[in-house]
Image (tube, helix red, strand yellow):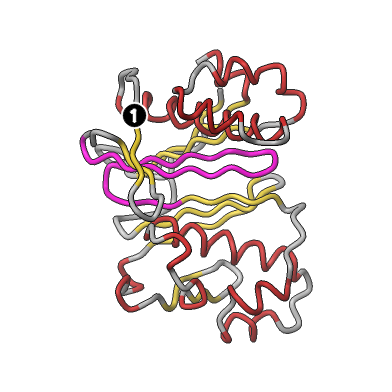
Amino acid sequence: MAAGAIFGHSAPVAIQLFLCTVGPGDEPHLSGLLARLDEAERDRASRFMFERDRLTYAAAHALLRHALDQVAGVQRPWRFAADAYGKPSLDPSLDGMCFNLSHTDGLVAVAVSRRGDIGVDAESIARAPDESTFTNLVLAPEELAELEGCADRPNRLLRIWVAKEAIAKAIGLGLSLPVKQIVLRGEMPRLIALPEAHGPTGAWSLHSERYGLHWLALATRHGEATPALRIAMTVEQLLAA
């Protein structure tokens, strides 16, 4: 297991980010990952058609339990609840701990905070974004204007999408949130507009980066979104932890 750089210090640490790479070579570890999950999670994993999707889901939820153990400082039989929009939380709550997770081809990510809601999203750079869908459903006019003349439109679209998803997941309204009203600007996306009920934008912090073969973003309105601590590991290391 490798600990990343410490970007800052607080007591407790503001945001802790846990990352785990997942690949075809990890398929023999699927049973070990499933053993870390509860019955409901194992049932959901069994519904995926492809083993790679079962593996990614199981790794994400095993990583979530490991991350919560690390942040809480004790192993617990964690239980979860979801609100009307599907946003998960601890049940019962514990010391203000909030979490969010994301999984995509090759990577799972979990962010944990004791300061309030957080969103994390990751996406493989291999994904080919559908420009017509982005134009019609995702991008604001200001964002479309910035894309004109962009040398690498697919990667730019993915970076915008991941950043918007992180913000949307922190808000927690699911598909009811109009993502076109989340407006970003600049090569390093910065938030310039939100649906009125979720502003002001100055209360928000957004962190976006390229992480290997993935785009990664975190968002919060409770302090700094740049992770104060990040831990990166493989599936094998996760199972050994």
**Residue under label 1:** 79
Magenta-drawn stretch contains 96: yes
**Which residue is located at x 43 percent, y 57 percent?**
219
* Residue at the extreme left of the image, as rendered: 95
Query: 64 left or right of 78?
Result: right
The residue located at (55%, 81%) in the rendering is 140
Q: What residue is rendered at 78% in x and 73% in y?
A: 151
Quadrant in the rendering for residue 93:
top left
Residue type at mark 1: give it: Arg
Q: Position of residue 72 (x, y in %)?
A: 30, 27
Give the residues in magenta: 95-119
- Asked whether residue 97 is drawn in magenta, I would say yes
Question: In screen coordinates, is 85 left or right of 48?
Answer: left
Q: Is residue 115 above or below residue 141?
A: above
How would you rate the neighbour count of disc 1 (Cα within 10 Å): few for under 14, some for 14-19, many for 20 or more?
A: few
Placement of 142 over or under 123, stated as above or below:
below
Q: Residue at image x 64%, y 82%?
A: 144
